[in-house]
Image (cartoon, rainbow, N blue to C red):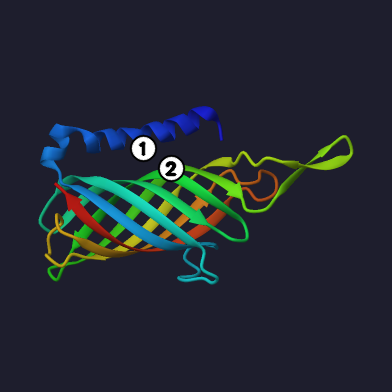
Amino acid sequence: MKSYLKKSLVAGCLFALMLLGNESFSQKNSMPVSVSIFNEATAIPFTKFTTRPFHPGIQVGSGFAYNQHRNHQWLQTINLIYYFHSDLNHGIGIYTEFGYQYMFKNGISFSPLLGVGYMRTYSVNEEFALDNGQYVKRKDKGNGRLMPSLSLEAGYYPKKNFNGTKFFLKYQAWAEYPYSPGFIPVMTHINLHAGVQFNKH
């Protein structure tokens, strides 16, 4: 990935964080904090719901609403994510999502979200490079890639209010691009999250 693209993605995520930290903005918008654990898998999106074996991950995030009504809102999230795939790699990333959320009278909500971010992965296996006819161990400096995503989230607000606690399940389809140009251009993943969101006022 070209350096200017990396900088643009990181700058966009940092801008969202600055909005969250802005005192005047925060006074008008509650500041949600979400934490989820998830199972990561390399799979074609929407062909599987759960996979085995379990590859653990954790995500911590926040966000804000652009225009909030009683039962629906447009929203943006900002998230830090880490996963460990025992057969492939482990990765750490930052990404932002834009989405729409609708809440029914019983407190159940539904949200489609589109996201983009930056993911850096490190191999779980030793790496070697050919040097003067011999293979020598090479330090893994990691690989940085674009991280587009599409997520579907189902949630439940016990108090039937967007500013209250939410429990949620989230199906996230995402990709690493470019992965291995000329061989595997795109590597697709699915994450199945279970988490909770609460608001910091």
Residue 4 vertical position relative to residue 149 in the rendered view, above or below: above
Q: Position of residue 117 (x, y in %)?
A: 43, 42
Q: Position of residue 199 (x, y in %)?
A: 18, 52
Residue 13's mark? 1
Left/right placement of residue 78 relative to residue 138 reads left
Q: Position of residue 108 (x, y in %)?
A: 20, 68
Residue 192 vertical position relative to residue 176 in the rendered view, above or below: below
Instruction: Name the residue that disc number 2 marks.
Output: 117
Tell me which residue sits at (65%, 42%) in the image: 140
Tell me which residue sits at (14%, 71%) in the image: 106
Most extreme residue toward the top is: 4
Task: Identify residue type, mark 1.
Answer: Cys
Sequence-first tag of 2 and 1? 1
Q: Position of residue 156 (x, y in %)?
A: 22, 67
> Marks 2/1: CA distance?
8 Å
Left/right placement of residue 144 relative to residue 93 reads right
Q: Nearer the viewer, residue 86 or 11?
A: 86
> Mark 2–mark 1 contact, CB under 8 Å?
yes
